Amino acid sequence: FVGSMAQSRHASRLSFMIPVMLSGVIIMYIPGLLYLGSLVGFDERVWAWGFTPFILADCVKAVIAGLAFPYLQRIVSKI
């Protein structure tokens, strides 16, 4: 999903890439949380072990990637 959106004509806009990167984080969390829930049961442990410790750092990384992508895309296109 993120790769196909990165190739779109809107990829040079920050207002487009930051939500795309954040949606990529959510897309990756869904199967991970489902798998963890199948192992430990679908209760508060899934959130405590598989979501809460990681979501802040992953969102920060996604925002940084969304901010950097348009600039890096311009640099690479000149090469």
Image: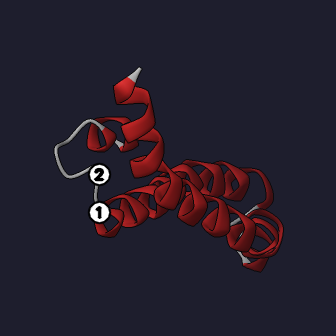
**The residue under label 1 is which amino acid type?**
Phe
Tell me if residue 69 comes above or below residue 18 in the rendering. Answer: above
Which is nearer the eye, 69 or 52? 69
Q: Position of residue 63 (x, y in %)?
A: 55, 65
- The quadrant holding residue 25 is bottom right
Disc 2 crowd, CA 10 A, few/some/many (<14, 14-19, 20+): some
Q: Residue at x 20, y 52 (%)?
A: 10
Please, what secondary structure does the residue beneath circle 2 have? loop
Tell me if residue 62 comes above or below residue 70 in the rendering. Answer: below
Tell me if residue 70 comes above or below residue 43 in the rendering. Answer: above
Q: Pointer 2: what residue?
A: 12
Q: Pointer 1: what residue?
A: 16
Which is nearer the eye, 52 or 76? 76
Q: Position of residue 49 (x, y in %)?
A: 83, 66
Please tell me the numbered disc located at residue 39: none
Please, what secondary structure does the residue beneath circle 1 have? helix
Q: Residue at x 29, y 62 (%)?
A: 16
Q: In the rendered picture of this protein, how many numbered marks are placed on residues?
A: 2
- The quadrant holding residue 43 is bottom right
Mark 2 and mark 1: Cα distance apart in space: 8 Å
Which is nearer the eye, 48 or 56? 56
Query: Contact, CB < 8 Å: mark 2 with mark 1?
Result: no
Q: Position of residue 71 (x, y in %)?
A: 44, 49
- In the rendered structure, the answer to whether residue 66 lies left or right of residue 42 reads left
For the C terminus, which image quadrant? top left
Which is nearer the eye, 63 or 26? 63
Q: Residue at x 31, y 70 (%)?
A: 15
- In the rendered structure, the answer to whether residue 45 lies left or right of residue 64 reads right
**The residue under label 2 is which amino acid type?**
Ser
